[in-house]
Amino acid sequence: MAKSILITGGAGFIGSHVVKFFIKNQPSVNIVNLDKLTYAGNLQNLVEVENNKNYTFVKGDICDENLVENLFEKYNFDSVIHLAAESHVDRSILNPMEFITTNVVGTVTLLNVAKKFWSDFSDKLFYHISTDEVYGSLENETDFFTETTSYDPRSPYSAAKASSDHFVRAYHNTFGLPVVISNCSNNYGPNQFPEKLIPLAINNIKKNNPIPVYGKGENIRDWLFVVDHARAIFDIFHKGVVGQTYNIGGDNEWKNIDLIKLLCKIMDEKLNRPKNTSEKLITFVTDRAGHDMRYAIDSSKLKSELNWKPSVYFEEGLEKTVDWYLNNEPWLENIVNGNYKNYYQDLYKNR
Ligand code: NAD
Ligand code: TYD
């Protein structure tokens, strides 16, 4: 049973749900959350656990080897759950280098320190959180990504994540480091930074601003409620087999345009607007460069071996998500009133 866990990127969207899930479901464990607090990190995501005696926040960079070594020394980690990353495809098109630094160099820095400090690998685990985007883009609607699908990353983001996955496996094969990897589909839910499709659309609908839909809106994503992802990570952390990879997905594929129309319907109801008001905000804009057509995950291995399955229906999860954003206006306004404004104007000005 793990006693001391280093969670990286715990102030971000998924990381904050993972931290809260572990504290709730395994209160005796010590958790240290190492996060650089980039634009995407937000301590507001963690207020409900910040005073927990088994929880410590450290502001810092996973690329800072001295810092990571000091933390290993001080807290004697037996496990790492590694989520810290640059995570947004559009930003990776604007600035690939930051993605290589954090996602590749940062991951290898953590692997090196774990290898150095864990002279004895028994009861240790390096759990690397990754994405289905490493598998590339599906064209045929009957195809799904399985754990043995060849890697074919097509954006700087997915290329950097794929590279980090390869390093994690290489450290297992070469040095025997005990690792596990999971690759998940698109997450949605409370606390997601509003550069991503669903919270961006919620914010724009609320403010009666155009909803930018890339290309024809025909790209397909599989969506999973973030707490279901946190639960999968908890299950894999405890029951996953060292050296293995697990795909995590929602069995929930949506064309972007259909998803946005459903969101518009929910928002009209929540905001007491006449039917079809928000749909009028849909605006087709220039497509993302190299836009992957379809992601679809086969998570039957995780279901059959570890008895996990998604628990939140999409309509229910989307409604919960909308409610959260409408009830947490200060959280959203703090973000959209800051640097986000410049990012948004820059990214969308030529579309
Ligand atoms: P996010 O962008 O919301 O959060 C990333 C967090 O990492 C932030 O708190 C940020 O401050 C921190 N961070 C970034 N660079 C850092 C550095 N150099 N050192 C320390 N901390 C740093 O991302 P997310 O959506 O929560 O994704 C978390 C992980 O899950 C990522 O590894 C991502 O690739 C993976 N993932 C995300 C999705 C998704 O739909 N969002 C799906 C599958 C996998
Ligand atoms: P995103 O949330 O950025 O996740 P990812 O690119 O990692 O799948 O985008 C989800 C889908 O929505 C993707 O097909 C791109 C599309 N999209 C838009 O159409 N408009 C937008 O403004 C954004 C941010 C995304």
Image: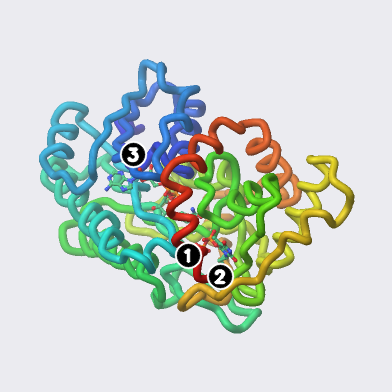
- CB contact under 8 Å: marks 1 and 2: yes
Where residue 250 sits in the image (x, y, percent)? 62, 57
Residue beneath disc 1: 132
Specify which label sits upstream in the sequence, 1 or 2. 1
Question: Residue at point 22% right, 64% down?
Answer: 170
> Which mark, residue 37?
3
Q: Is residue 200 visible?
A: yes
Q: Is mark 1 within 8 Å of ligand 1?
A: yes
Structural crowding at the residue carrying mark 2, measured as other residues with C-alpha within 10 Å and reported as few (<14), some (14–19) or many (≥20): many
Q: Is mark 3 within 8 Å of ligand 1?
A: yes
Specify which label sits upstream in the sequence, 3 or 2. 3
> Amino acid type of disc 1?
Asp
The CA distance from mark 3 to mark 1 is 25 Å
In the displayed structure, 217 sits above or below 70; it is below
Question: Residue at point 41% right, 45% down?
Answer: 339
Which residue occupies the extreme bottom position in the image?
140
Q: Is mark 2 within 8 Å of ligand 2?
A: yes
Secondary element at tag 2: loop
Structural crowding at the residue carrying mark 3, measured as other residues with C-alpha within 10 Å and reported as few (<14), some (14–19) or many (≥20): some
Q: Is residue 61 shown left or right of residue 244?
A: left
Secondary element at tag 3: loop
Residue beneath disc 2: 295
- CB contact under 8 Å: marks 3 and 2: no
Question: Residue at point 66% right, 31% down?
Answer: 327
Q: Nearer the viewer, residue 240 or 284?
A: 284
Q: Nearer the viewer, residue 292 or 182?
A: 292
Q: Nearer the viewer, residue 11 or 228?
A: 11
Which quarter of the image is occupied by the C terminus? Answer: bottom right
> Amino acid type of disc 2?
Tyr
Where residue 83 sits in the image (x, y, percent)? 37, 47
Which quarter of the image is occupied by the N terminus? Answer: top left
